[in-house]
Amino acid sequence: MLITRRHIDISLPNENIKLRPDLAKQVVAEARRLQSSFPADFLLSSSSRRAVKVNGHSVYFPYLSALFSRFLNEETALVFSIKNPFMFEKFIKEAVSCLPNEKIKLLLKYGIKTVQSTTTDIKLDGGSFSEVTLFLYKNKRWRIKKETNSNYNGDIDAGVRLREEAYFLTSLPKEARHLFPKVYGENSVSKSSRIGYEMEYFPYPTFAQLLFCGNLTAGMALRLLINIYGSLEKTLYSHKSHIKRDDDYFSRIDRRLERVFRTPSNSGTNLKKILNRTKITIGGFECEGFFPIYEKLRNDKSCRQLLTFPDYSLCHGDMILEDILINPLDGDFKLIDPNGQSFSKYYDFAKTFLSLSTYYEHFYFDLFDLNYKTDGNIDIRFFDDRAIAVYDNLSGLFWHYLREYSEFYFANDKLWRRRILFLTALQNIAIVMFHLI
C-alpha cells in the first residue's frame, strides 16, 4: 500500500519532481537527514546512488520513495493499492521514468485504484474472518476500520476473535502500547450485527514483503526479530495472565474440521479427500494421513503436556511475519492483528516459525503451485527460490539465537524447543483447513 498526497506527482517525469515550495523544502530536508542517519539497506530496494530532483534539489531516490509514506495524513490523498509484494518495487521504478501522458496506462498496468474523494472507503486485504477498510477520518487522517466479514456473521470464531482482539488492544499495559496501533473505541463498529473497531493506520510494508522484495538479508531480518522479541519480553511478556487454556488449540482444530465437513458436497472436495486419506505422499515422501496423526496427538499425554506452559502471560498470539509492519526508514515496527485468545509467549514463537519453516506467506500470497492426484500424491512448487532460501537461513539463525538466549526467554524450561515445535505442528494442522477450504 502506497499513499501520497494529491500534490505529490508520483509520475516523476524526467526524474524531476515539482512540489509545493514549503513541502519541497520539508521533503528535501527530511530526505537528507535520513540519508545521513540510516543505511540504505533498510530502504526500498533500488540503487542508493540514483538521484532525482525535488524542485531542483538533488535527493537519492530510495530515501525519497520511502518518504512518500511520511506525507499522507492531511488533505485528500491518492491511494495506490498493490497486493502483490513483488510489484511494489517494480511500480516505484517505473513511476520514476513515467511520462505524464503514460501515467494512466501505468496505473492500469498494475491494477492500481486511484481515489480522489475524501468520502471514498478503500477495501484492503483483511484477515480470515474480517473486512478491513481504509478511510479518511473527518477529512484529515487515515484510519483503519476492521469488522467481521459479512460471510461470517454469527460465526463463533469470527465474533469472539474480533471482540477479544479489540479488548486486547484497548487493555494493553502502558509500556507496550507503542508496539501496537492505537484503537479508537472498542466495538465502535456495530451496524448490521457486525463486530469491529477503528484504529490508526501505518503505511509500512510487512516484514514478509520486505523479505520477498529483497530488501532484507537473513542477517538483517534476524536483527529485527531480536529487537521485536526483546521489546515484547520487556513490555508484554512480563505481564502475567491468570487465564489458562492449555488444550484450547485442539478445540479450535475441531471447530475448523466441523466447518470443513459441514460445507456443501461440491465445496472443498479435494481438501476433504486429502483429509480422509490414511496415507498421503508429499514431494515423494509417504506420510500418515491427517486423522491418524491427529488422533495420535490428541491421545498422547506427553504431547498434550507440552501445552501446559510453565507460565502464562500477555502475548500477541499471531506473530507471523505478515502481521509485523516494518518502517523501512529506521526498522521501527508495529504489530497488527493480535489474537486475544492466546496467553503464552510460546504461541508467538510458534507462529513466527510457522512463517519461517512452513513458508506461510508463500501460501498466503499464492506464490506456489500445487498438483494433487487422486492416488494421494501431492507435489508443491514454490515460485521464489531466493525468498525460500532467505526464510530457511533466517529460521536456522533464529533457532540458534534462541538456544543461546533460552534462559532469557524461557528461564529454566528444558522443554521450550519441543513446546514451540509442537505448537507449530498444531498450527500447521489448523492453518490448512483455514486457508484452503
Image (cartoon, helix red, strand yellow):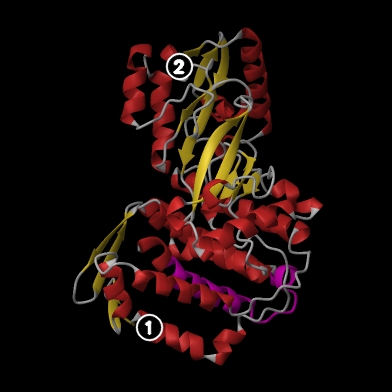
Q: Categorize mark 2 by other alpha carbons within 10 Å: few (<14), some (14-19), many (20+).
A: many
Highlighted range, magenta: 406-431
Query: Which residue is depicted at the point 36% across and 71% down?
Result: 262
Disc on res. 12 = 2
Residue closest to the far front: 192
Q: Quadrant of residue 63?
A: top right
Q: Nearer the viewer, residue 297 or 97?
A: 297
Q: Is residue 333 above or below residue 67?
A: below
State left or right for residue 274 relative to residue 246: left
Residue 271, visible in the rendered structure: yes
Residue 421, visible in the rendered structure: no
Q: Quadrant of residue 332?
A: top right
Q: Categorize mark 1 by other alpha carbons within 10 Å: few (<14), some (14-19), many (20+).
A: some
Q: Residue 134 location in percent, x, y? A: 53, 36
Dot 1 falls on a residue whose secondary structure is helix
Query: Which residue is depicted at the point 72% across and 55% down?
Result: 231
Q: Residue 297 location in percent, x, y? A: 48, 85
Q: Quadrant of residue 56?
A: top right
Q: Amino acid at mark 2?
A: Leu
Q: Main secondary structure of the magenta part?
A: helix
Q: Nearer the viewer, residue 151 or 409?
A: 151
Q: Is residue 346 above or below residue 50?
A: below
Query: Which residue is depicted at the point 47% across and 20% down?
Result: 10
Disc on res. 291 = 1
